[in-house]
């Protein structure tokens, strides 16, 4: 059964690089039936950003890639931008911890301005390292994470979280952290969620599931909001990692072939969840073949 022509097909979290496939990966996504990408910024090149000007250049590179993808493939691209939380660990070694924290705060304020200007739709990835660090570094990362939530709260956008895989207990811990920053839990997105958990175990946080076959099958019966993502890295050293950019579109096509119930399930991550979490309804551009 073909997917309805007005149904968007969305990869909620991916990366593209000027040194990787870039537009060519987006062409593959489009050929598989994809229509919309949430494109997260990343470090381009070997140097970890160590000043707000470096982050401004990074965000602008992400924006240039997004506009190239839109003009050359017809996909709609939304930007998710912020200083990557692991950068703080690296830059603290060269700048000192206090100076590194200030750079990240300045970069987060810049990301907030981009959201206010309509150049980005979310602040992310933000959060904490997914590996053990010294206690003082962990505390600094938590301090910066709190700033990130405050920035996103004040500009009225979602925050996309990078952290370790969460258990029911750590979902609740993260929800408590967000609540103390007065951040609305329904706009807090846990990116790269691999384990599909009952809604009661999520603490009000929105999961963005890595679109493995098992996660797609398990999440399809869950009430929203939730998303699917590839976390495609566009790294020539790791081709296809984490999942190929066409994966969500292929999974959607397979689910659509199961019939009307499959198509209705697709409306949760591709329409209803975007509306609920981001506050807008994605539409397929008229005059651009979607699939």
Image (tube, rainbow, N blue to C red):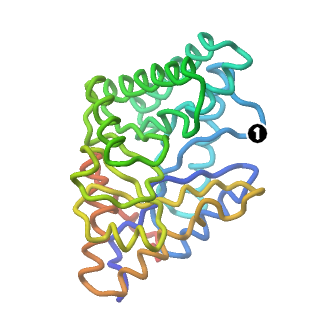
The total number of labels drawn is 1
Up-down: is 142 above or below 261? above
Quadrant hosting residue 240: bottom right
- Between 233 and 58, the one lying in front of the other is 233
> Taking 17 as reference, is 8 left or right?
left
Residue drawn at (56%, 75%) of the image:
31
> Taking 26 as reference, is 142 left or right?
left
Q: Residues within 10 Å of mark 1 (few under 14, many from 20)?
A: few
- Residue 71 is situated, as x and y percent measured from the top left of the image, at 57, 57
Q: Which residue is mark 1?
A: 45
- Between 104 and 157, the one lying in front of the other is 104
- Between 222 and 230, the one lying in front of the other is 222
Residue drawn at (55%, 55%) of the image:
231
- Residue 161 is situated, as x and y percent measured from the top left of the image, at 44, 40
The quarter of the image holding the N terminus is bottom left
Q: Secondary structure at mark 1?
A: loop
Residue drawn at (27%, 55%) of the image:
225
Up-down: is 23 above or below 135? below
> Taking 98 as reference, is 114 left or right?
left
- Residue 234 is situated, as x and y percent measured from the top left of the image, at 67, 56
Quadrant hosting residue 261: bottom left
Residue drawn at (39%, 37%) of the image:
159
- Residue 109 is situated, as x and y percent measured from the top left of the image, at 47, 21
């Amino acid at each position: 059964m073909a997917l309805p022509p007005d149904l968007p097909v969305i990869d909620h979290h991916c990366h593209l690089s000027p040194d990787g496939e870039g537009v060519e990966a987006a062409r593959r996504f489009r050929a598989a039936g994809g229509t919309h990408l949430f494109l997260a910024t990343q470090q381009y090149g070997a140097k970890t950003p160590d000043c707000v000007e470096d982050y401004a250049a990074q965000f602008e590179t992400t924006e240039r890639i997004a506009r190239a993808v839109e003009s050359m493939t017809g996909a709609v691209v939304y930007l998710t931008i912020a200083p990557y939380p692991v950068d703080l660990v690296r830059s603290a070694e060269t700048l000192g911890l206090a100076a590194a924290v200030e750079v990240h705060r300045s970069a987060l304020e810049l990301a907030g301005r981009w959201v206010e200007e309509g150049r980005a739709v979310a602040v992310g990835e933000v959060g904490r390292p997914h590996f053990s660090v010294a206690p003082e570094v962990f505390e600094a990362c938590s301090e910066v994470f709190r700033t990130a939530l405050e920035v996103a709260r004040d500009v009225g956008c979602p925050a996309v979280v990078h952290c370790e895989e969460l258990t029911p207990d750590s979902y609740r811990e993260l929800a408590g952290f967000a609540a103390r920053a007065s951040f609305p839990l329904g706009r807090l997105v846990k990116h790269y969620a691999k384990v599909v958990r009952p809604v009661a175990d999520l603490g009000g946080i929105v999961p963005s599931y890595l679109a493995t076959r098992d996660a797609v099958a398990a999440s399809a019966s869950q009430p929203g909001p939730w998303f699917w993502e590839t976390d495609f890295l566009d790294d020539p050293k790791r081709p296809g990692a984490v999942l190929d950019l066409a994966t969500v579109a292929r999974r959607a096509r397979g689910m659509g072939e199961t019939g009307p119930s499959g198509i209705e399930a697709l409306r949760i991550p591709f329409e209803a969840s975007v509306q609920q979490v981001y506050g807008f309804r994605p539409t397929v551009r008229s005059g651009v073949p979607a699939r």
